[in-house]
């Protein structure tokens, strides 16, 4: 199998896995929400309601496709498409498992090993807001516009703190490549031990960037009906909702690989590089990712929503100074 | 590789033209974002991945979002305002002519090399870091101080506005 064929298969596989995980995250979210609220949750479609995501998808596809007459038609269609594309693009630089060596050829379990992988992630995440802004504005509805503007200001505010927390992480690992950062965390030397404050800032910002509770102000029902997706129906709405779950999956994978060692697990260096190591590494990576997805859901159904001024105060007056402090402390430790 | 460069260059120029001739400011901003993307693609073609991504993060990811943000707040109507007087047209003509002359002069003096695409490594993060923090450390620090001063200035200006008396005496 040539390098190119393998890459194409791998990219398609990652694409499929992202969609599959996102699909079952919706199921997990509904089940966990039901558990936390002492309900049963979806249990009609298939055993334990396992076919529920499929049923939801079919339902969304068969709903009436409605485009408001006063909307900007092209941008109205482009909005959800941009949002979905940017959500799917992020998985390109995440190393999902250790290299696989078969008969002397090495197969990399990463779509692209950019030497500036973290910056790529950061760039694509910062583009995600265009989907919301464009869709919200094109709806020509004040609630949509307000939701879109909230999303934009929230993303910009929290990107700063996120960038600063990444700066201190890069100072520790002295590499911008995700592969290098994961490889450095072999055994138990996970970055969370060296960067506890950075991790806390990063995870709060990740919650804010994915627009999930307690930061889901852009789609706050009590104030904005549906927020930026008020006017969207059918699969366009589906794409917006679904892309959020892909964001959750990717954010969890990034959190796992930046701070929790990615596919590294204790005694990993005792194993020979081969199928067993790759499979085990992949399983460990997905277990860690699954834990963070669980955390995302858990927090959503536990904490109430912030007020908007609280959100801005947290971003600008707490997280950014803390992140700067973290950079200074990290620099001090590196100098000593 | 050369073909990719020419296709990208053509697309960049088309996107840049669309910025100017779009009827609606929001579309203009979106075309500007597309232009930045295409310029980043050119950087990647020159093996300057760091520059490409920083270009996307800073311009497309932050500055253009703020642009879009402000234009959405302005609530501009779809009908384009016609130029009421000859002044803006004259100003536009003079500036375009000046820039055109400048470009023409620099084009005449420049030595156009034929290799458009190559294997350079001056845009990678290590090389840029070395240049910035070894060769040009002092100018870079001065620039950062300048930015800090600008930021503090903005905060100060906003503060003063709030402390002014509610009713200003009319001049």
Image: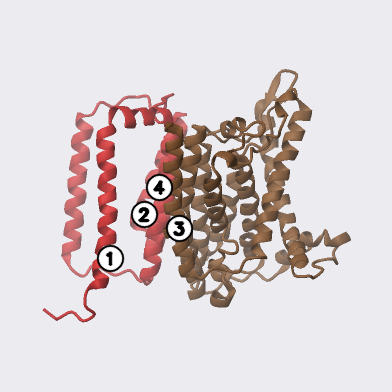
Chain colours: A brown, B red
Residues tagged by mark 1 and mark 3 found on one chain of the structure: no
Badge 3, how many Cα within 10 Å: few under 14, some, many 20+? few
Label number found at residue B58: 4
Residue for badge 2 = B19
Q: Is there CB contact under 8 Å for labels 4 and 2? A: no
Q: Mark 2 lies on which chain?
A: B
Which circle, 3 or 4, is nearer the viewer?
3
Q: What element carries label 3?
A: helix
Above or below residue A86? Residue A227 is: below
Residue B42 visible in the snapshot: no
Residue ranking furthest to the right: A47
**Callouts 1 and 3 close, C-beta under 8 Å:** no
- In this rendering, do the residues under marks 3 and 2 share a single chain? no
Judging by the rendered image, the residue that carries numbered circle 1 is B158
Q: What element carries label 1?
A: helix
User: Quick one: label 4 or label 2, which is nearer the N terminus?
Assistant: 2
Cα distance in 3D space between marks 3 and 4: 23 Å
Binning the other alpha carbons within 10 Å of mark 2 as few (below 14), some (14 to 19) or many (20 upward) gives many
- The reply to whether callout 4 and callout 1 are in contact (CB within 8 Å) is no
For marks 4 and 1, give the CA distance.
24 Å
Name the residue tied to disc 3.
A318
Nearer the observer, disc 4 or disc 2?
4
- Looking at the image, the residue that sits furthest to the top is A104
* Alpha carbon separation for disc pair 1 and 3: 20 Å
Question: A64 or A163, which lies in front?
Answer: A163
A178 w.r.t. B11: above or below: above
* A315 is higher (above) or lower (below) than B43: below
Residue at 55% in and 55% down: A204
């Amino acid at each position: 199998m040539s390098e190119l064929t393998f890459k194409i298969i791998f990219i398609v596989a990652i694409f499929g896995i992202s969609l599959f995980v996102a699909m079952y995250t919706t199921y997990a979210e509904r089940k966990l929400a039901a558990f936390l609220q002492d309900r049963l949750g979806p249990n009609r479609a298939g055993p334990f309601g396992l076919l529920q995501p499929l049923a939801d998808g079919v339902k969304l596809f068969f709903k009436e496709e409605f485009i408001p007459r006063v909307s900007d038609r092209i941008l109205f269609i482009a909005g959800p498409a941009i949002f979905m594309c940017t959500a799917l693009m992020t998985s390109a630089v995440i190393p999902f498992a250790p290299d696989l060596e078969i008969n002397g050829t090495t197969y990399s379990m990463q779509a692209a090993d950019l030497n500036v992988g973290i910056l790529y992630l950061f760039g694509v995440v910062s583009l995600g807001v265009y989907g919301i802004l464009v869709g919200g504005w094109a709806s020509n509805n004040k609630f949509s516009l307000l939701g879109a503007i909230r999303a934009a200001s929230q993303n910009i505010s929290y990107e700063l703190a996120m960038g600063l927390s990444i700066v201190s992480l890069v100072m520790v690992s002295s590499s911008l490549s995700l592969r290098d950062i994961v490889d450095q965390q072999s055994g138990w030397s996970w970055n969370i031990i060296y960067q506890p404050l950075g991790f806390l800032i990063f995870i709060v910002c990740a919650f804010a960037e994915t627009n999930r509770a307690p930061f889901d102000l852009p789609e706050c029902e009590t104030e904005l009906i549906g927020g930026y997706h008020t006017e969207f129906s059918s699969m366009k709405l589906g794409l917006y909702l679904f892309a959020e779950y892909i964001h959750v999956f990717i954010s969890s994978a990034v959190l796992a690989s930046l701070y929790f060692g990615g596919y590294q697990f204790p005694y990993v260096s005792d194993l020979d590089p081969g199928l067993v190591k790759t499979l085990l590494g992949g399983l460990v990576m997905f277990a860690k990712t699954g834990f963070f997805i669980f955390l995302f859901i858990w927090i959503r159904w536990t904490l109430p929503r912030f007020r908007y001024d609280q959100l801005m105060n947290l971003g600008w007056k707490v997280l950014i100074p803390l992140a700067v402090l973290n950079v200074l402390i990290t620099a001090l430790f590196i100098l000593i | 590789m050369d073909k990719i460069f020419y296709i990208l260059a053509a697309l960049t120029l088309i996107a840049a033209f669309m910025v100017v001739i779009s009827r609606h400011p929001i579309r203009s901003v979106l075309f500007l974002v597309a232009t930045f993307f295409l310029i980043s693609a050119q950087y990647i073609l020159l093996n300057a991945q760091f520059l490409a991504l920083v270009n996307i993060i800073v311009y497309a990811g932050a500055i253009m979002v703020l642009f879009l943000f402000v234009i959405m707040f302005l609530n501009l109507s779809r009908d384009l305002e016609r130029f009421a007087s000859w002044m803006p047209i004259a100003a536009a003509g003079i500036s375009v002519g000046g820039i055109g002359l400048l470009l023409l002069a620099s084009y005449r003096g420049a030595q156009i090399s034929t290799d458009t695409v190559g294997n350079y490594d001056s845009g990678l993060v290590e090389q840029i870091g070395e240049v910035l923090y070894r060769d040009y450390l002092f100018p870079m620090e001065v620039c950062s101080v300048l930015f800090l001063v600008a930021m503090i200035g903005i905060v100060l200006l906003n503060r003063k506005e709030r402390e002014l008396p509610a009713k200003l005496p009319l001049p």
